[in-house]
Image: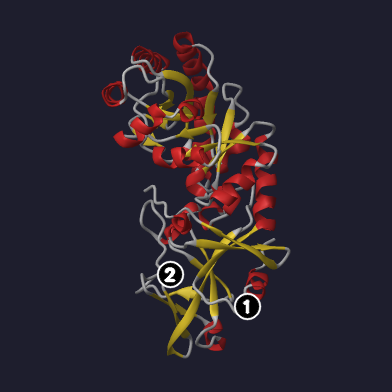
Amino acid sequence: MTNFATWDRATKGRSAPFAVVDLDAYDANAADLVRRAGGRPIRVASKSIRVRHLLERALATPGFAGVMAYSLPEALWLAGHGVDDLFVAYPTTDREALQALAADERALEQVSIAVDSREQVDALRRWLPHGAPVRVVVDVDASLRVGPAHLGVRRSPLRSPRVAATVARAAQGAGLRVVGLMFYDAQIAGLPDSSAAVRLVKRRSDASLRRRRGAVRAAVEAVAGPLTIVNGGGTGSLEVTGADPALTELAAGSGLVGPTLFDGYDAFTPQPAVGFALPVVRRPARDVVTCFSGGYIASGPAGDSRVPTPVHPAGLSLVGTEGAGEVQTPLRGKAARDLAIGDRVWWRHAKAGELAERFDDYVVISGGEVVDVVPTYRGEGRCFG
């Protein structure tokens, strides 16, 4: 398991703040994801990584195949670096990127983009050069409906086989190539097993989706022919979602990194593979120290689950009236008494890939030693939103 004291020793003398990736933990997490996928190929979710070196490392691991990108400019950039089989899992309105996709023969074969409505198809028809054979994947709502309640994320408006087929038919009529389907079951994959109610929602969602996915796939294939991408699942649901024969692949990314939002699942415990160190710069009181920076708040509903967590030395906690600040973060606890100005505090972040937007590079640790420094997307001068 991850030893934060080892990270501290390995990076002795390095000025904080900085972020690290532990390859031993990263590789162990990759192996566990493959085990849980039960033979299904895993598409790497790039938004949870945002470091080309780490994306390529995962893709070189047997059991992983293809990238689930989060923006079209990102996918085109990765394709330009030789990455194959990129699926942009969110609709795009970037007209310049669409023009670049249409003009790039290799990208036209390697990049697919998501659509989930006639409205999006009509927009692509207007924005793309006439006849550009862009690959599209129809994104289908995978939430659970219980009466008027919507349990899951708000993504696609498509649910029924008939309506999904209608969008596929419209895409075909617009000259697009329908190559796949996507079903993101966030209420299974993205929720820790925190209560009996959550476990019940997951079971009901899985049963509902197993009835619906196959029917949607059959309806869309009747329009578009055999599909090469039928994607579902996420880090939190690989062994559940992967049991559905309607799928051709799964997706995961956060499980490689092991952020705090993926603590608390019954079926798996990822190792923290990425973390960061902040320097102590003040001592406002005997049992309080203040670190420089630290306000790395994760996206999603605001609350305690989205803030970073101090993990080493043990026994420190955020001050409730201040939290994690943009330029300074106070911490309280007995361990503060033994920290001197310039000492470091180690942290885990809440959401996997967003930390990479805060640092130009990750210090790479393997075997308890620093072996490399690799740039993040930010360090390569790239920000994709």
Q: Along the line of sight, which residue is nearer the eye, 270 or 68? A: 68
- Horizontal and vertical percent position of residue 374: 57, 58
Regarding mark 1 in the picture, which secondary structure is present there?
Answer: loop
* Residue at position x 57%, y 46% in the image: 55
Residue 122 shown left or right of residue 255 in the figure: left
- Horizontal and vertical percent position of residue 161: 42, 16
Q: Along the line of sight, which residue is nearer the eye, 78 or 187? A: 78
Residue 169 seen in this snapshot: yes
As drawn, the label of residue 294 is: 2
First reached walking from the N terminus: tag 2 or tag 1? 1
* Residue at position x 39%, y 23% in the image: 159
Q: Is residue 349 above or below residue 153?
A: below
Residue 109 shown left or right of residue 4 in the figure: left
Q: Is residue 34 above or below residue 144?
A: below
Give the amino acid type for the residue marked by disc 1 in the picture.
Lys
The outermost residue toward the right is 367
Residue 175 shown left or right of residue 51 in the figure: left
Mark 2 residue crowding within 10 angstroms, few (<14) / some (14–19) / many (20+):
many
Foreground: disc 2 or disc 1: 1
- Horizontal and vertical percent position of residue 260: 53, 57
Give the amino acid type for the residue marked by disc 2 in the picture.
Gly
Task: Say which quadrant the N terminus sits in.
Answer: bottom right
Residue that mark 1 sits on: 12
Mark 1 residue crowding within 10 angstroms, few (<14) / some (14–19) / many (20+):
few
The outermost residue toward the bottom is 286
Q: Is residue 92 above or below residue 385?
A: above
- Horizontal and vertical percent position of residue 115: 37, 27
Q: Along the line of sight, which residue is nearer the eye, 347 or 278? A: 278
Residue 141 seen in this snapshot: no
* Residue at position x 38%, y 72% in the image: 320
Residue 43 shown left or right of residue 39 in the figure: left
The outermost residue toward the top is 222
